[in-house]
Image (spheres, rainbow, N blue to C red):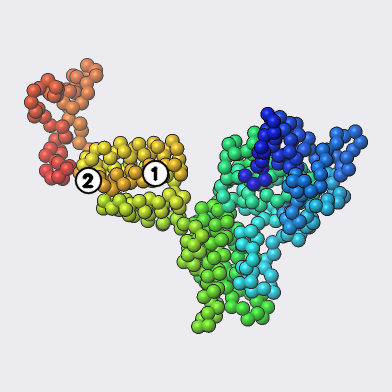
């Protein structure tokens, strides 16, 4: 995990030595806890106060000193550029990067002197759109909203040591650079459970803050901010731009627009991952601009459509919408491929869904249904096979359960098919739905008679107990009104 890894070194003698993740000093493992307590404490001032315990010196040019040295090219994000009390007038150490002012890193709308292709070059859009202020940070209201713990600490200039745990693209990279010049506050970011991936001594000294997957609304806000930074205008459903009076400045550059529906589609398809959404937007814009540069292109304007952003996503990420049309298209294709006994195509559609991020339990539930609906009594073992696959998926999850689902899909595709039970039950439902008037009563001989009153009313009278007879029993089991009805043939 970036920023939090404790580097294990070869053991010297009988005790293992480790490297401190804060100052990179090497020391015996038994002393790491005491050392971290002291190392993570902010100094009272820049210079050591009299009587304070001396900090172990490290030789200039040593391996530990090199690890400790900050890269001169690194940048401090102004989101956390808040000096602690007592350090406001302290000068940055010579090894630290220059401290940019918060205003210097605030995102601009766009540079009017550059064309859109020039703005798209260089750093990836996802990197340039990193939040510079708390107001730019989208989709984490529970963590950074008003009166939350982390926001209160930030606004009071007290940045604790924290570990951010959340899915990819939800905003953890934002926090990785150093927070302050001369003072180290450990901030880690991971998609893995820190309980299993972080050193226990380090974890006990940090607060774990869980970040949520970005909502569609948050993604739309991030993408809108990105298109504004590029100078791309948004077209609503009526074809009107959100900046009809935009500052073209007399430039001969062809205006670039993006459909509002395209932004909405991109926000839905990126599955809460801002990096995927921004990369898809960048690829779509670059592709359409490349076409517009061709000599035979005489278009007075360029419009990025829904198809363009889907193509951009297809290049950078498997296109699969868990909540939209593609979700139902793929499960339908899987169902029909198994029904047609095409195991090859069935595996393809299964992988298309799982690799696109589909919930494996959703697929497993559909396989259980298929085992009874389409295979049925032609192979009674199909249902236990599907139920076992579902239970296995529930126990071990992805990615281990993918082979369980693959085995079940191939079994069901190759199994004989019968819809006899499925069709008969549908006939029963249709009979009940089309019943005119009240439903027919249960025949008296089929009713239970637990009391004398019920027996006196004729409940259970005339019932023939089948185990008492050696041969078949002539007895009606349907209401009188449905006598002769055969739901398996649907004929009286």
Residue 430 in sight from this viewpoint: no
Q: Nearer the viewer, residue 224 or 192?
A: 192
SS class, disc 1: helix
Checking the image for residue 281, the label placed there is none
Determine the residue positioned at 35% across, 36% down.
388
Determine the residue positioned at 36% across, 54% down.
348
Q: Nearer the viewer, residue 230 or 36?
A: 36
Residue 195 in sight from this viewpoint: yes
Q: Label 1 belongs to which residue?
A: 403
The residues bearing labels 1 and 2 have C-alpha atoms spaced at a distance of 22 Å
Q: Is residue 162 above or below residue 136?
A: above
Task: Look at the image and tell me in which quarter the N terminus lies.
Answer: top right
Quadrant position of residue 470:
top left
Picture coordinates of residue 281, whole percent (x, y): 55, 63
Picture coordinates of residue 129, whole percent (x, y): 64, 59
Q: Label 2 belongs to which residue?
A: 416
């Amino acid at each position: 995990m970036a920023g939090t890894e404790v580097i294990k070194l070869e053991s010297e003698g009988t005790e293992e030595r480790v490297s401190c993740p804060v100052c990179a000093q090497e020391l015996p493992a038994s002393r790491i806890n005491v050392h971290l307590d002291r190392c993570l404490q902010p100094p009272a001032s820049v210079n050591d106060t009299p009587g304070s315990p001396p900090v172990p010196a490290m030789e200039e040019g040593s391996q530990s000193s090199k690890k400790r040295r900050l890269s001169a090219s690194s940048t401090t994000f102004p989101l956390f550029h808040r000096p602690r009390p007592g350090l406001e007038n302290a000068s940055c150490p010579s090894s630290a990067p220059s401290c940019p002012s918060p205003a210097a890193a605030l995102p601009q709308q766009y540079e009017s002197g550059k064309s859109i292709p020039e703005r798209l070059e260089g750093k990836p859009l996802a990197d340039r759109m990193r939040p510079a202020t708390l107001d730019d940070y989208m989709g984490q209201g529970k963590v950074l909203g008003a009166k939350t713990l982390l926001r209160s600490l930030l606004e009071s200039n007290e940045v604790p040591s924290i570990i951010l745990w959340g899915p990819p693209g939800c905003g953890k990279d934002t926090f990785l650079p150093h927070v302050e010049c001369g003072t180290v506050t450990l901030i880690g970011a991971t998609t893995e459970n820190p309980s299993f991936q972080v050193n226990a001594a380090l974890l006990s000294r940090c607060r774990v803050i869980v970040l949520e997957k970005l909502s569609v609304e948050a993604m739309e806000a991030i993408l809108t901010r990105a298109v504004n930074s590029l100078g791309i205008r948004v077209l609503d459903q009526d074809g009107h731009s959100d900046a009809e009076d935009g500052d073209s400045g007399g430039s001969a550059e062809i205006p670039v627009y993006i459909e509002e529906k395209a932004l909405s589609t991109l926000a839905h398809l990126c599955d809460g991952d801002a990096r995927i959404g921004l990369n898809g937007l960048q690829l779509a814009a670059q592709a359409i601009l490349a076409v517009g540069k061709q000599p035979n292109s005489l278009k007075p304007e360029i419009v990025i459509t829904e198809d363009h952003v889907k193509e951009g996503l297809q290049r950078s990420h498997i296109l699969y919408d868990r909540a939209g049309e593609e979700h139902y298209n793929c499960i339908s294709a899987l169902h029909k491929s198994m029904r047609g006994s095409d195991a090859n195509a069935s595996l393809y559609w299964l992988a298309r869904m799982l690799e696109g991020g589909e919930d494996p339990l959703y697929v497993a539930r559909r396989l259980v249904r298929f085992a009874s609906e389409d295979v049925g009594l032609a192979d009674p073992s199909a249902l236990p096979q599907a139920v076992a696959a579902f239970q296995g998926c529930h126990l071990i999850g992805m990615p281990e359960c993918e082979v369980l689902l693959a085995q079940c899909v191939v079994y069901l595709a190759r199994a004989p098919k019968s819809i006899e039970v499925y069709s008969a039950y549908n006939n029963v439902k249709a009979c009940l739905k089309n019943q005119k008037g009240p439903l027919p009563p249960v025949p008296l001989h089929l009713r239970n008679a637990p009391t004398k009153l019920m027996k006196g009313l004729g409940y259970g009278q005339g019932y023939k107990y089948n185990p008492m007879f050696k041969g078949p029993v002539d007895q009606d089991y349907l209401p009188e009104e449905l006598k002769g009805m055969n739901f398996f043939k649907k004929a009286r």
